[in-house]
Amino acid sequence: MITHPTQQRALRGHRPQRVSQRVAATGEYVARLSERLTDRDRWLARMLYEHKVLTTHQITEIAHPSPRAANARLLQLYKWRLVDRFQPFITSGSAPMHYVLDVAGATVLAREDGLDPRHLNYKHERAIGIAHSLHLAHTVGTNGFFTALIAHSRQPGVAGELTTWWSESRCRRHFGDIVLPDGYGRWHEQRTEFEWFLEFDLATERPDRVAAKLPRYAQLAAATGITTPVLIWVPTARRETHVRQALATSLGVLDGPELVPVATATADFNARPSAACWQPLNPQQPNAGERLRLAELNSAWPHLPPLSPTSSPTTTTGNGTSTDLLPPSPLAPRPTLRRPRR
């Protein structure tokens, strides 16, 4: 017979104390919080607004010198309700902590951009609700593709850097009436600019469904007069072979296949996306050709005009709203020395 059952509260893990959502959204609290935030904290909040969710590992890759430094700062930002967090369940081991924007972070961003927080396209329930989304793995994987590029550019002696990173949501607002890419990026290396749309493949749909997206990219290029390469990242070499065959078939029936330059890469190579892992697609020989670095892909399509470093992707087909926040720079601000508070 159990005479002294364990109290329910004793079964709960420790949770750091946090202010309530109501208090965190007030102007008084945000004003006090702003004195404690660094440029990197504000940048991270903007990145989470743009890209929805980032893991501890991804945040460390793009903004911190070590996991210990990242965890220490993220814990403080969590207590201040600049960010919220969750840890998905996996069948073996433990998943990393996933971070999303919290109410104080959204209010800070709105005030910085001169917007009324009530008009900002943000709801905490929707932000934290991604924890139960069927697209969580896809979103995290897509973001990991770009954070790997940023991490590479942070290494000493590396000449290239990711200069633009648009999320799926931003691409949807600007191009969603024609195509729905998983992201848009631009890479700068030694006076070379290369831009692309990303299709991040998890092998959850048939190869012919992946290939069926190419006519829409051709339609976008014809409508805007701008030809943008499409890069397709697949999980395995076997999957890449099947996808490339389907892509070659789709390109072969297009009136203007030159409007859709395509290259594929596979995670089987265990290479960063900037490395020599990209194989441009030749419809006549879909599984032949050498692998090129990201910065070398321009040479595979000599008909593409050179890009200007100051140009930006066209938005003539978009329906962006006036309450859109500006897309953040992919590179975190350099840390600055702060004067001790008296």
Image: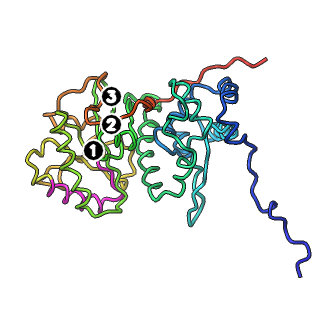
Q: Secondary structure at mark 1?
A: loop
The residue located at (14%, 34%) in the rendering is 302
Q: How is the image coloured?
A: rainbow
For the record, the magenta segment spans: 232-250
As measured in the structure, the alpha-carbon distance from the residue carrying label 3 to the one carrying label 2 is 31 Å
167 lies above or below 193: below
As measured in the structure, the alpha-carbon distance from the residue carrying label 1 to the one carrying label 2 is 9 Å
Q: Amino acid at mark 1?
A: Asp
Inspect the magenta stretch and tell me whether residue 72 lies in it.
no
Label 2 Cα neighbours within 10 Å, binned few <14 / some 14-19 / many ≥20 = few
Residue wearing tag 2: 319
Residue 125, how many percent across, how many down? 57, 49
Residue wearing tag 3: 189
**Magenta stretch prevailing secondary structure:** helix
Q: Amino acid at mark 2?
A: Asn
Nearer-the-camera pick, 318 or 254: 318
